[in-house]
Structure formats: C-alpha cells, structure tokens
Amino acid sequence: MAFLEIKKYPNPILRKKAQEVKEMTPEIKRLAFDMAETMKKNKGAGLAAPQVGELQRIIAVQTNEGAKIFINPEILKKSKETQINEEGCLSAPGLFFKIKRSKEVEVKALDENGSEINISASGLLATVFQHEIDHLNGVLFIDHLALPKKIWEIIKYRFKK
Ligand code: ZN
C-alpha cells in the first residue's frame, strides 16, 4: 500500500482528459486501492485518478458504506432539480465554494473486480460523483463559478502562497 502525492491546482495534468480503463490489471487495482487510502488519509469526500497524476478513468468516493472505487464511471441520468453544496477539492486546499449541481444522479461504473454497478446518489453524494467525474474530463469545481468570481478567487489563491 502506498499513499499517493496529490497534484495541486494549477498543475496542467488536472486539465487533461483521462482514458477509459480497458482491462482490470493488477496495476489498475493497486492504483484504485492506493487512491482510496490516499483519500481517507486526507479526509477527502472523493478523489479522481488525474489528481494523483494518472490519466485513467478511476474515482474513489466516500459512500455511506465507506470508501468505494468506481472505474469508468458514467452519469446515466441527472435530475433537473438542483441543489447547492459547499465543495472543496484536495487539489485546491483551502478553497471552498458553493456550487449548484443536479440533486440526484444515476451512475454506472465497474467495481474493482470489473463487475458492473449502478448507483443512485442524492444530496452530498450526488455532488461528490459530479465533482469527481468532472475531474476525469479535466473540469474543476471552479469552472462552475461565474467568471468574475472565478477570476477573483484564482487571484487570491495564487497570491496566498
Ligand atoms: Zn476535486
């Protein structure tokens, strides 16, 4: 087991699109397992593979039943009804924004054994799935902010260090 280094914004890898996992190799399983451990250690609600420098479609999500791995996750359905939750991101420590997203999502994925799973998520869990699946497409939570607020927040973030 290994804890993985989390890439921080504005690392360019966070803007790349992750590739579909074609085969459940021991390397993929190990990466998924290490991602779950890394997420837990950092007390994250979720973690996507690009955040640890791997362009693979894998996310770890903290569910009611503990940390779970979702491989090649896809949103099948999104509710029209939205909700606003405060989001943070392990790749942007200290930044928290209220972001509007669908209130419910249906997600299809593979588990760590390659079996197909379907999950319906609502509330905070629905937000986490949308946030993590965004990462697989190079999309960050700040992209959901209105432009003036986004510019202002990025300026503050860059000068904080
Ligand atoms: Zn994130």
Image (cartoon, helix red, strand yellow):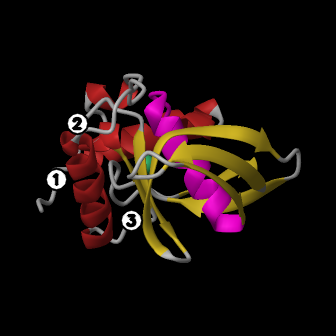
Q: CA distance from mark 2 to mark 1?
A: 9 Å
Q: Is residue 45 left or right of residue 49?
A: right
- The image quadrant of residue 86 is bottom right
- Residue 135: say if magenta: yes
Q: CA distance from mark 3 to mark 2?
A: 17 Å
What residue would you read off at disc 2?
53
Q: Where residue 123 sits in the image (x, y, percent)?
A: 71, 66
Q: Where residue 39 sits in the image (x, y, percent)?
A: 32, 63
**Residue placed furthest toward the bottom:** 65
Give 146 or 118, whichever is nearer the viewer: 118
**At 39% across and 24% down in the image, what residue appears?**
19
Q: Which residues are magenta?
A: 123-140
Classify mark 2: helix, strand or loop: loop
Badge 2 amino acid: Gly
Question: Crowdedness of circle 3 by 10 Å Cα count: few (<14), some, many (20+)?
Answer: some
**Residue placed furthest toward the left:** 2
- Residue 132: say if magenta: yes
Q: Which is more N-terminal, label 1 or label 2?
A: 1
What residue would you read off at disc 3?
44
Give 157 or 137, whichever is nearer the viewer: 137
Q: CA distance from mark 3 to mark 1?
A: 13 Å
Q: Where residue 134 sits in the image (x, y, percent)?
A: 53, 37
**At 25% across and 34% down in the image, what residue appears?**
54
State which mark lies toward you, 3 or 1. 1
What residue would you read off at disc 1?
4
Residue 161: tell me if it is visible. Answer: no
Residue 86: tell me if it is visible. Answer: yes
